Every structure is written in C-alpha cells, then in structure tokens.
Image: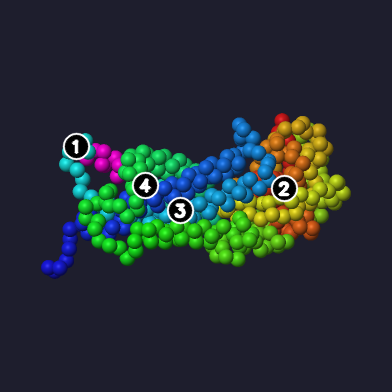
Amino acid sequence: MSGLRLAPPTEADFPSRLRSPSVTSRVGLWLGISFGLCFLTGLISHYAQNPTQPIPFPTSPSWGYRLTQGIHVVAGTAAVPLLLVKLWSVYPLLFRRPPREVRRLVLDGLERASIAVLVAAAIFQLATGLMNAAQWYPWGFSFRSSHYALAWVAIGSLVVHVAVKLPMIRSALGADVEASDNDRPTAVAAGALSRRGLLRTTWLAAGVAALAVAGGTVPLLRKVSLFAVRDGEGPQGLPVNKTAAAARITDEMVGADYRLEIVRGDQRVSLTREDLVAMTQRTESLPIACVEGWSAGAQWTGVRVRDLLDLVEAPAGAEVEVTSLQPSGPFRRTILQGNFADDERTLVALALNGQALNRDHGEPARLIAPNRPGVLQTKWLARLEVAL
C-alpha cells in the first residue's frame, strides 16, 4: 500500500514542453476559424429552413447551399483533431492551484466555469453534428433546435475565452513556437516530438479528417473520402436519404388514382401524372444538397411551378404550402417562398437524369428548386396551395 498515491496530480506531474501556450494558441487559432465557419454556415442552413424569412433566402447561385453545407461538415470534422490536441495541451491547467487572494480566486473560478461551458458545448456540437451526418439519432430531443441553441452558447463562450486570454494569445503567437517565455515553470521535459513536429502532425490530422468527408460535396474526392456519408450511388445515379418504404408510401397512393392538387382559395385544379407530362416540360441542372453535408448534381425534367400556379391565377410572389403524400414526418408540409415559386428553375419534377422518377426519388412527382435544403425538396407531391 505504500506505493499507492491518493493525492490528485499537480501541474508538476505534466512536465512536457509540448503542453505550452505556444502550441495551444496556434491550434486554438485554427480551431476558432473552424468553429467560426461552422457557426456562420450553420446560421445559413437554419435560416434557409425557416418557414418565415424577413429577407428571402436567395435562389442563386443554385449551388450556394451545397457549398455552405459542405464547408459546415468539412470544417466541423477538421475541428475534431484540433479540439483534442488543444484539450491535451491545456490539461495540466486543470490541476493548477487556485490563487489565495479573493479577487483573483473569483476571476479564476469564472474563467474555469467559462472554459467548462465552452468545452461542453464544443463536444456536444461536434459529437451530435457527426452523428447527424451519419443519420444516427440516439436521443429524444430535436437535433435542429438543440444544435442551433448550443451553437450560440459555444460561440459566445469562445468569444469570452478569447477575450480573457487575448494577452497570452498575442504573446504566444508573436514569439517563436519554441520560445519558453509563456511556459509553465515545470514544463521543461523534452517531448517525443518538437513543438513544430506536433503542430505539423496536428495540421495533417485535421487535413486527413477534412479529406475523409469532403467527397460528400466534391465528387472528385469520393474515392478517397472514406467517411463521407454518401458515395454518390443510388437509383438513377443519385443517393437517397429517405426511401418510399420509410415514408410509408404505398402503391395505391401513387397509382392510377394519383392527383396533384393546385389550390388557391376556391380555385382548384386536379392533375394526373399524365396531365403533368402533357404540359410543357423543362430540364434544369440542379444540385440536391442535404444538411448532413452530402450533395449531388442531376438533370431534372418537369413542369415549372410557376406554370402550375398560373392555372389558379396565383399572383407573383405568393408563398405556397407544399404537401407530401407521406402520412407523417417533420417535413411533410413545407413553405415554398415566393421567390422560389416564381423562379423559372423551380420544377415539379417528373424525371431524373432522363428517366421517370424512381419511387425512392419521389415518384410520381417531386419538388426541386435551386439553392434549397434537401429536406425541403418535397418528394411524393400531393398538393400545392397558394397562401392568401
């Protein structure tokens, strides 16, 4: 029993020179950039999914949402090794002896509390974000609202942390990475790597992590992106997020009795699929991009939504409630804002890449619009109702 140590570790138990503000500040700089990119692109995605938008979300460029969501997932994945290295580098500070003077003790406590909030929020955001990309939801809360709320907590605590540590950060970044001016007195032992070697390894790990998922957005990288959630394969050359079976779409729903209802007040037009095919067909090259970070481009053929709205004399700029045949689901009903409804590229698509829509892609008809989140590109269309 004489060799059993019951006392907690102290700073002196972590003598490596690698655990230095020089390393922490440099890794933290790139971690902050990654978090900033995630925060901004996350706000864009959240706003794009809002049913009401004081400033209309733009329809151009058609690939805009594809780009921002790709950046969101790539930056978030790259942040994982950066966060791990940063936490490793500051770990000894957990065992720093608190100051005795009351004012300094209070400030030290507040600093530790803010760091605890930052770390907890960062881990939550990265962990749930990666699980969302994999479409694995082992929780009972809403991912979208929780991820959005904690994003503000994470970015707020990050700003506070940077403000508190700014003098140290500026000093560390302004000095040579091997300088020891800001080191803990006990951090004197040589590590297995030099500080530059550790940083190069960290940048390499972040780059590999980013490359491992970038293929979800960049088709040329799909063969090397081992962890991209979609490989680009699927019916008619396009991946599927939610199958017809999962949405409980039956043969009867899409059979001979299928009708697409176009409604504006008392005006109503009911169209069979044959009626839709008989109308003027247009083909558009549009990507479909999902919040999980994957996207793919395709050729869509169908009837312009604006042409259908003209059948019920819908005014320009009118919003449209879009309803799916699926019996339930959070996006069974969505709002198509007026600028999307009027855009000549927005279609009720009947064909994909030159073939009639596969059931899993929305047969007999689906919505496709430029620069719109994939969850709002409603499949198995049942009704377009103009808001009055």
Q: Which mark is residue 184?
A: none
Q: Amino acid at mark 3?
A: Ala
Spatial separation of the CA atoms under disc 1 and disc 2:
63 Å
Identify residue for label 1.
Answer: 102
Q: Dots 2 and 4: beta carbons under 8 Å?
A: no
Quadrant (top left, top right, bottom left, bottom right) of the C terminus: top right
Q: Amino acid at mark 1?
A: Val
* Residue 90 appears in view: no
Question: Which quadrant is the N terminus positioned in?
Answer: bottom left
Figure disc tally = 4
Identify residue for label 3.
79
The answer to whether residue 183 is above or below residue 48 is below
Report whether 367 appears left or right of 218. right
Q: Nearer the viewer, residue 179 or 33?
A: 179
Q: Is residue 16 left or right of residue 67?
A: left
Give me the disc on residue 367: 2
* Rendered residue at 34%/48% (across/down): 175
